[in-house]
Amino acid sequence: MIDSQLRPSGVNEPWALSAIAAVAREDFVPQEARAAAYIDRAVPLGNGRYLPAPLYHAKAVTTAEPVKGDKVLVVTVGSQYLPTLLGQLAGSVDTVDAGDLAKGLPGSGYSLIVVDGAAEEIPAVLIDALAADGRLVTGLINKTVTRIALGRKSGSALSYLPLLEMGIPAIPELAAPKRWSF
C-alpha cells in the first residue's frame, strides 16, 4: 500500500508513513472485508458507511500535520482506524460518531478536527468546537465532486482551501439540508 498507492500519489513524509505502517487497517474493518482492507477504494463497514481508501487517510494526516501539542477530535463513521492513526501523532484524540453530533461533543477548544469522510456541510457544532485558528480537515462535496480540504477558523467562520480531488465516501449525517430552488 505504501509503495504502490501512497508514495506514487505524493505521500512521502517519513513521519506519516511510519504512523500508517504501524496501524493494521484490517483490524478496523468487518471480518469479511479484511482481505480488501488495503485496496485503493473505500471498504464497506455496513449500514451505508465506509472506511475511506488509504490515500484519503494519508492525505488527511499529511494535510493536518498533527503534533504532540494538538488536541484532536475525529468525526468517525464506525471505524476507529483514523483516531488510532492520529493517536500516534497528536497529544490527545477524542472521537464522536457522525450520527451522534446532535448529542454534543466530548469537549471543545480543539486545535484540529478531522472528518473521516466527505461532507456537504460542516455542522456549526464542529466549527464552534474549534479553537481560534484551529484547523479542520475533511472531504468536501461540491455537487458530484469530492475534494480533500483544509479549513482554518478565523473568528466564528471557517475558510476552506480545497486541495485535491479524490473519491471520498459521503457521510450521510453531514449532507446539506434540502433546499428549494428554481
Image (tube, grey):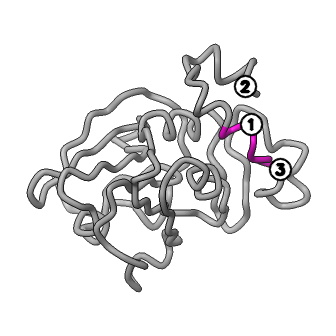
Q: Is residue 63 above or below residue 94?
A: above
In the image, which residues are magenta? 19-26
Q: Please state the horizontal and vertical placement of residue 151, each as a whole percent of the image.
A: 28, 44
Disc number for residue 26:
3
State which quarter of the image contains the N terminus: top right
Q: Residue at x 41, y 76 (%)?
A: 101
Q: Give the residue type that dot 1 points to.
A: Ala
Q: Give the residue type that dot 3 points to.
A: Glu
Helix, strand or loop at disc 1?
Answer: helix
Give the mark nearest the N terminus, 2 or 3. 2
The residue pinned by badge 1 equals: 21
Give the mark nearest the N terminus, 1 or 3. 1
Q: Please state the horizontal and vertical placement of residue 134, each as a whole percent of the image.
A: 26, 52
Helix, strand or loop at disc 3?
Answer: helix
- Asked whether residue 177 is in view, the answer is no
Q: Residue at x 76, y 57 (%)?
A: 28
Q: Is residue 24 magenta?
A: yes
Instruction: Give whichever of 65, 42 is nearer the camera.
Output: 65
Helix, strand or loop at disc 2?
Answer: helix
Q: Quadrant of residue 66?
A: top left
Q: Residue at x 52, y 69 (%)?
A: 95
